Amino acid sequence: MLTLVLREPRLDEAKILNDWRNDSESRLYNSPIEYEKTLRRLKEAGYDFADEGRSEYCWIVECECRPRGAVLVKNIDWRAGTGELGYVTATESRGKGIGSLAVRMLVEKIFSESSLIKLIAYTKIGNEKSSKILDRIGFRQGVAQTAQDLILVSSYFTNLLVPRGAAVRDLPHN
């Protein structure tokens, strides 16, 4: 049984976050990101929803006292109650269930600690690992066209799938 912790990121972790985001597997589905942008986003992001009003919140995923990934909610529209989900798993930690559990924990955290009611996640067509993570949690998928790619747009509504106070972990697993 995996035991994960979502904790506040440290600025000295910007390099590993950037490395995970820019490794060869991540680059198949994501545009490269410069270290300076990763560091700036980490400095500006919150980690506690009591500090509501930020447009991005980020947590390090820790397992066995080591960083194994990161999860975030960004592009938050507090008036509409929406946010975009993002996640990355350390290269050596992929395929072990860490990403699935971390995203499930983040969704539960968002809906229990913030006023957000809808999450959106974007994945490129062909990114089966990411799509499976979202499917397992209960995101509903549709397809959209961007200038370069077809992408899956996945939505999760707290009021449809998780009544206030209910835990995401109580949802059926696929």
Image (cartoon, rainbow, N blue to C red):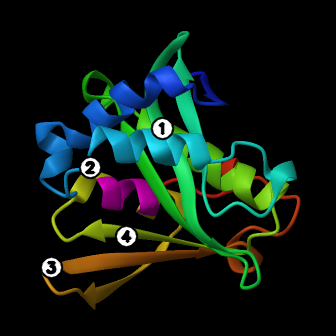
Q: Earlier in the sequence, mark 4 or mark 1?
A: 1
Instruction: Give the mark nearer the N terminus: 1 vs 3.
Output: 1
Give the alpha-carbon distance from disc 2 to disc 1, as whole Å.
15 Å
Instruction: Identify which amino acid the numbered label 2 is placed on.
Output: Ile
Q: How far across and down, in percent of the image, does residue 66 sit? A: 48, 13
In this rendered view, identify the residue nearer to me: 148 or 46.
46
Q: Residue flagged by tag 1: what amino acid is it? A: Ala
Mark 2 or mark 1: which comes first in sequence? 2
Amino acid type at circle 3 is Asp
Query: Is residue 94 shown above or below 105?
Result: above
Q: Which residue is the site of mark 2? A: 33
Cα distance in 3D space between marks 4 and 1: 16 Å
Which residue is painted at 70% across and 42% down in the image? Answer: 47
Secondary element at image label 4: strand
Label 2 Cα neighbours within 10 Å, binned few <14 / some 14-19 / many ≥20: few
Circle 3 is placed at which residue position?
Answer: 149
- Part of the protein shown in magenta: 130-134
Q: Earlier in the sequence, mark 3 or mark 4?
A: 4
Residue 142's label in the rendered image is none
- Residue topped by disc 4: 122
Asked which secondary structure carries label 2, the reply is: loop
Which label lies toward us, 2 or 1?
2
Query: Which mark is drawn over residue 70?
Result: 1
In contact (CB < 8 Å): disc 2 and disc 1: no
From the top left corner, tell me how far across and down residue 20 is, in percent: 29, 34
Q: CA distance from mark 2 to mark 4?
A: 17 Å
83 left or right, relative to 135:
right
Mark 3 touching mark 4, by CB under 8 A? no
